[in-house]
Amino acid sequence: MSKHPFTQQNYTLNSCNLRKLTPDDALIVSQSLVKIEPWRTLGYSADTLSNYLLRSDDLLYRYALVESEKIVGVLCVRYPWLRGACLELLAIFPSQQGKGSGREVISWLEAELRENNNLWTLVSSFNLDARHFYEKVGFIEVGQFDDFIMAGYAELLLRKVL
């Protein structure tokens, strides 16, 4: 692995820009995520999400997805992780969904990680829209963790071979 990914603070994509997440961004993102799936069903609080987005972690790369100066989503990627990277969080806010931003972010990740073997993620089993999205962009289910985040719900481990 000669090329280290995620070396820039900002990236320009066709549908949006990625910028390093700021504390102000984290507040906006956390307050938005608690209103949508899967975070609503799993009972996450805005404080819990904000703490995750802001905690010190040198291996977690966090970006706000921005379009026309407005935050439209968030991306958090752990690198390195299991011969590749783990997409810990990709959320596109409802106003931006269906416009290609998620697919474009995955394509960008593939380019950033091209010298790695894997891209991993977890998805809640009940989150059918997210499961369908990940299937469309080439992830396959490789495992299931019952009661992983909350009793009664499963998280599915997905892998995309790069």
Image (cartoon, helix red, strand yellow):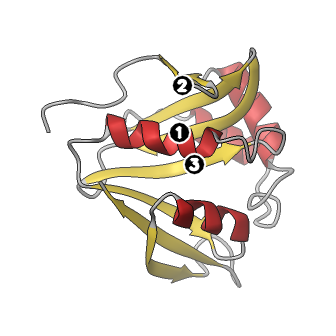
Q: Nearer the viewer, residue 103 or 47?
A: 103
Circle 1/circle 2 CB separation < 8 Å: yes
What is the secondary structure assignment of the residue under circle 2?
Answer: loop
**Of callouts 2 and 3, the N-terminal one:** 2
Amino acid at circle 1: Val
Quadrant of residue 60 in the image?
top left
Q: Residue at x 68, y 74 (%)?
A: 150
- Closer to the observer: label 2 or label 3? 2
Tell me if mark 1 has few (under 14), some (14-19) or many (20+) residues whose alpha carbon lies within 10 angstroms of its own.
Answer: many
Q: Is residue 83 left or right of residue 49?
A: left
**Of callouts 3 and 1, the N-terminal one:** 3
Q: Which residue is mark 2?
A: 13
Tell me if mark 2 has few (under 14), some (14-19) or many (20+) residues whose alpha carbon lies within 10 angstroms of its own.
Answer: some
Quadrant of residue 41 in the image?
bottom right
Q: How far is the residue under mark 2 from the one under mark 3?
A: 18 Å
Circle 2/circle 3 CB separation < 8 Å: no
Q: Is residue 66 left or right of residue 118?
A: right
Residue 85 image offset from top left, x and y in percent: 35, 49
Residue 149 image offset from top left, x and y in percent: 62, 70
Residue 105 circle label:
1
Amino acid at circle 2: Leu
Quadrant of residue 78 in the image?
top left
State whether residue 142 is above or below residue 114. below
Residue 89 circle label:
3
Q: Is residue 94 left or right of residue 137?
A: right
